[in-house]
Image (cartoon, rainbow, N blue to C red):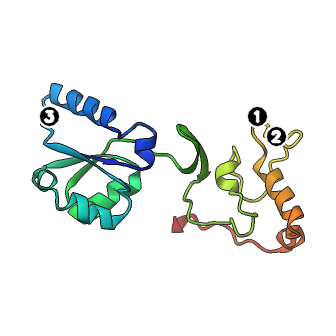
């Protein structure tokens, strides 16, 4: 087995740093698996780096399986580039931003029907606790979400942003096609 780690997001979360890889290697070997080597690539979602750094690595080439310590996009990128048996080692749930090291904010659910151009750059699918894409639920109180009073209601944020930028009237009168879930 070969362990491939991401030197970007997963590394910053300590999920693919040297310590995490060493602990995982030790665990696998205690459980009868042979780990030939490991490699952290700066940004494994960049196919150019996968081809340059991973596909040329002799230990990678000879491995029967690759354990990927990164998001699902990387698992699929490595599988596509190598046709190897890939095993996801992490369970990613969203795309976010780094607020500070170890603190990440969910901003995108990669839903396939982006409305950011209409909603002032605020994603209702991701930032609304109920993932409502057609407007607020009506349960917010003082601009805060009814399910979590520490979070701003995404739809209040959208309303205020569109009002501030002079785009509210257009938003309120424009027809938004229904989401086509078959295209995700």
Q: Quadrant of residue 181?
A: bottom right
Which percent across, then down, holds residue 147? 74, 35
Question: x, y (%) of residue 37?
Answer: 17, 43
In the rendered image, residue 66, in percent from the top left (x then y), is placed at: 22, 48
Q: Nearer the viewer, residue 12 or 151?
A: 12
Q: How many marks?
A: 3
Among the two numbered marks 2 and 1 on one chain, the one whose residue lies closer to the N terminus: 2
Give above or below for 108 relative to 144. Answer: below
Label ID, residue 150? 1
Residue drawn where x is 76% and y is 64% of the image: 120
Q: Residues within 10 Å of mark 3 (few under 14, many from 20)?
A: few
Query: Which residue position holds label 2?
Result: 144
Q: Residue at x 19, y 56 (%)?
A: 84
Q: Is residue 24 above or below residue 70?
A: above
Q: Nearer the viewer, residue 18 or 122?
A: 18
Q: Residue at x 31, y 63 (%)?
A: 49
Which comes sooner in the sequence, label 2 or label 3? 3
Secondary structure state at the residue bearing disc 2: loop
Q: Secondary structure at mark 1?
A: loop
Q: Is residue 48 left or right of residue 95?
A: left
Q: Closer to the camera, 64 or 175?
A: 64
Marks 2,1: beta carbons within 8 A: yes
Badge 1 crowding class, 10 Å Cα cut-off, few under 14, some 14 to 19, many 20 or more, is few
Q: Is residue 76 left or right of residue 32?
A: right
- Estimate the spatial distance between the alpha carbons at disc 2 and disc 1, rounded to whole Å: 7 Å
Which residue is identified by label 3?
Answer: 33
Name the residue located 61 percent from the left edge and 66 percent from the top edge.
113
């Amino acid at each position: 087995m070969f362990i491939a780690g991401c030197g970007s997001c997963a590394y910053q979360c300590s999920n693919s740093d040297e310590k995490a890889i060493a602990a995982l290697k030790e665990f696998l070997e205690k459980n009868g698996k042979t780990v030939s080597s490991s490699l952290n690539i700066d940004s494994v979602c960049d196919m150019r780096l996968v081809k340059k750094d991973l596909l040329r690595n002799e230990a990678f080439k000879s491995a029967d399986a690759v354990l990927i310590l990164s998001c699902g996009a990387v698992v699929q990128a490595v599988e596509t580039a190598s046709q190897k048996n890939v095993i996801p080692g992490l369970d990613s749930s969203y795309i976010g931003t780094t607020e500070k090291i170890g603190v990440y904010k969910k901003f995108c659910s990669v839903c396939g029907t982006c409305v950011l151009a209409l909603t002032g750059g605020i994603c209702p699918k991701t930032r609304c606790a109920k993932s409502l894409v057609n407007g607020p639920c009506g349960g917010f109180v003082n601009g805060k979400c009814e399910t979590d009073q520490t979070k701003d209601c995404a739809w209040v944020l959208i309303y205020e942003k569109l009002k501030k930028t002079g785009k509210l009237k257009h938003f309120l009168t424009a027809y938004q096609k229904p989401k086509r879930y078959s295209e995700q």
